[in-house]
Image: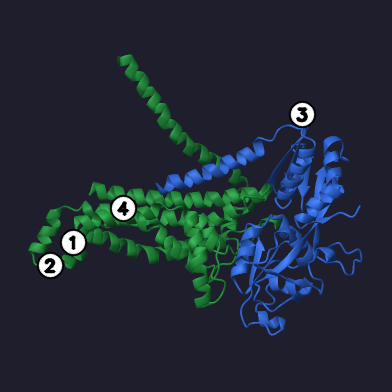
């Protein structure tokens, strides 16, 4: 009984993986259909953009899939997807692909609404997540004498990748951090634990949690679109559409749509920062 | 007629084989995917490594092996006495009417989806532990409490069957010699049903070690080796489920390799349970 239950679980995992890796349609199957696959942070917004886009052009179809940034870049490379999506910059071995920035996302540090802290420096965040600072009162500000509960994302997550790149640099995220596998779960824990700190995408921010200003800059849309680099909110990452070569045909049309004012509106509604051009 | 019988026999055999071939397929697949990375890292380094950072090429799952066993051990401490006393009450002391109400009620516990256990754990037990003992509340203790409840029905119903299988003459003999009902249970019935009870406990253990969803929601999933019951923990199962979504390359294979270790542990537990149960029958 116990054995068969566990086996069933494994079987389901395998079938799922099999479906993900085995069933992608071949490229160029139909010129009216493109496949967009990759980052799960980009997936919801890509779906929304695709929905609005295909409403205008009913004869075209856009299929959006998740899988993660690395898988998306891999899919673009192999041709399994027409557009691979990535929520991190391309690495050295991936430079042969053509990236297009479709929007910027901001990473927001969040705490419980009852936490008196409102501003934090990058160095402090680094020290908290690498466990050099373990108690809130070390940060001064008349904070509680309680242990800090740090919440991070799992290995492989695009948000975690961006956090490591933008904040941690060479420092390592401590093994003591709680690990959750979705933005929602991080937010829920921070909302219920008065001594927790976590990081999420700007788009996922809601009133249950309190966002922190970083180096004095509050995470607002105005501060993120700020032209002056000094005043601009620091923790911003690009959302990339990755193609094998300079985009053409339907992929290009879709990207042009996202860069249009209509596209920018949708991006802003979802809490993303449109590109400037 | 005979011809037809042959065909039916053949078809039934095919169906039986398909069930077993699923097992063979799973075993083959999990080893095929996971072994290369174990080969690359070395089995010993894989199971004794302290650092798990798959995107940086560090694959050590000792914290998770320890975590899995700690959580399971905690669940056993909480669940086994409770389940055993339940079974004893049901088999030895309850009237047939109470038994008919209580036994199905306990078995309903087995039908509750594990995500519901996880949710209740996250909403009730975690905040309780946080407010009472400090820390985050996501901990070995929280998992053990929830798993202890989850294994109740398994252990209770199998031990109940074991107790019911003891012939009435044993009890009558004991009572006739002047032993009280409790003395009878303690000194005659329990020792006689020992193998069945041990098998029940091992099956409960298998259930606890293999549970994923509820654990992922309550454990906190940190990568440390928990030293107190209130430290967060990551188990083998939650490691696989947590990271499977984004994993590629060696990382993905290392998750399959984690599955191999889990597979072997659970296989051993089940074989042990079968062996003990068979010994009981042989006796």
A201 or B19: nearer the viewer: A201
Q: Secondary structure at mark 3?
A: loop
Provide the residue designation for mark 1: B188
Where the N terminus of chain B falls, by quadrant? top left
Provide the residue designation for mark 4: B104
On the same chain, marks 1 and 2? The answer is yes
Q: Nearer the viewer, mark 4 or mark 2?
A: 4
Residue plotted at (74% across, 65% down) = A108
- Please tell me how crowded label 1 is: few (under 14), some (14-19), or many (20+) other residues with Cα within 10 Å: some
Q: Going by the image, does B163 lie left or right of A271?
A: left
Q: Which chain is blue?
A: A
**Disc 2 + disc 3, Cβ < 8 Å:** no
Residue plotted at (88% across, 41% down) = A246
Provide the residue designation for mark 2: B179
Q: Secondary structure at mark 4?
A: helix
Provide the residue designation for mark 3: A30
Marks 1 and 3, how far apart at CA: 76 Å
Q: Badge 2 sits on which subunit?
A: B
A34 or B242: nearer the viewer: A34
Marks 1 and 2, how far apart at CA: 10 Å
Q: Secondary structure at mark 1?
A: helix
In percent of width and height, residue A91 lies at 81, 52
Marks 4 and 1, how far apart at CA: 27 Å
**Disc 1 + disc 2, Cβ < 8 Å:** yes
- Vertical placement of residue B79 versus B210, above or below: below
């Amino acid at each position: 009984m116990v054995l068969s239950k566990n086996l069933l679980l494994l079987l389901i995992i395998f079938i799922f993986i099999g479906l993900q890796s085995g069933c992608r349609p071949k490229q160029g199957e139909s010129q009216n259909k493109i496949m967009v696959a990759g980052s799960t942070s980009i997936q919801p917004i890509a779906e929304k953009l695709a929905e609005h886009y295909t409403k205008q052009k009913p004869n075209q179809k856009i299929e959006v899939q998740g899988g993660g940034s690395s898988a998306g870049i891999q899919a673009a490379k192999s041709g399994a997807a027409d557009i691979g999506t990535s929520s991190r910059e391309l690495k050295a071995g991936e430079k042969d692909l053509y990236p297009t920035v479709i929007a910027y996302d901001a990473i927001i540090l969040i705490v419980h609404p009852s936490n008196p802290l409102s501003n934090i420096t990058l160095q402090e965040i680094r020290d908290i997540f690498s466990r050099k600072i373990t108690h809130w009162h070390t940060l001064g500000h008349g904070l509680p004498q309680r242990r800090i509960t740090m919440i991070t994302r799992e290995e492989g997550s695009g948000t975690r990748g961006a956090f490591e790149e933008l904040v941690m640099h060479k420092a390592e995220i401590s093994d003591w951090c709680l690990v959750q596998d979705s933005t929602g779960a991080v937010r829920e824990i921070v909302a219920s634990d008065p001594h927790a700190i976590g990081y999420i995408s700007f788009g996922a921010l809601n009133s249950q949690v309190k966002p922190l200003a970083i180096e004095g800059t509050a995470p607002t849309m105005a501060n993120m679109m700020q032209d002056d680099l000094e005043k601009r909110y620091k923790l911003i990452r690009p959302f990339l559409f990755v193609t094998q070569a300079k985009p053409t045909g339907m992929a290009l049309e879709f990207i042009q749509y996202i860069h249009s004012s209509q596209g920018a509106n949708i991006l802003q509604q979802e809490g993303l920062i449109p590109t400037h051009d | 007629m005979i011809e037809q019988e042959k065909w039916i026999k053949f078809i039934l055999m095919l169906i039986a084989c398909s069930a077993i071939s699923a097992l063979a397929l799973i075993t083959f697949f999990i080893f095929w995917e996971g072994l290369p990375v174990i080969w690359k890292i070395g089995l010993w380094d894989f199971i004794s490594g302290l650092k798990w950072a798959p995107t940086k090429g560090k694959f050590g799952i000792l914290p998770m092996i320890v975590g899995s066993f700690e959580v399971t051990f905690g669940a056993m401490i909480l669940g086994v006495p409770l389940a055993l006393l339940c079974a004893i009450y049901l088999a030895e002391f309850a009237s047939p009417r109470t038994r008919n109400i209580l036994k199905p009620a306990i078995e309903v516990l087995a039908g509750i989806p594990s995500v519901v256990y996880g949710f209740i754990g996250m909403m009730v037990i975690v905040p309780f532990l946080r407010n009472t003992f400090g820390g985050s509340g996501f901990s070995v203790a929280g998992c053990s409490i929830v798993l202890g409840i989850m294994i109740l029905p398994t252990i209770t119903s199998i031990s109940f069957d074991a107790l019911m299988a003891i012939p009435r003459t044993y009890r009558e003999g004991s009572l006739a010699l002047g032993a009280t009902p409790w003395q009878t249970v303690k000194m005659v019935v329990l020792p006689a049903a020992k193998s069945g009870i041990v098998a029940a406990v091992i099956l409960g253990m298998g259930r606890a070690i293999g549970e994923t969803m509820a654990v992922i929601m309550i454990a906190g999933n940190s990568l440390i080796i928990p030293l107190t019951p209130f430290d967060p923990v990551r188990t083998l199962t939650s490691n696989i489920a947590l990271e499977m979504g984004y994993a590629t390359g060696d990382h993905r294979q290392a998750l399959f390799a984690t599955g191999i270790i889990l597979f072997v542990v659970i296989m051993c537990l089940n074989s042990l349970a079968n062996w003990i149960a068979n010994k009981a029958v042989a006796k």
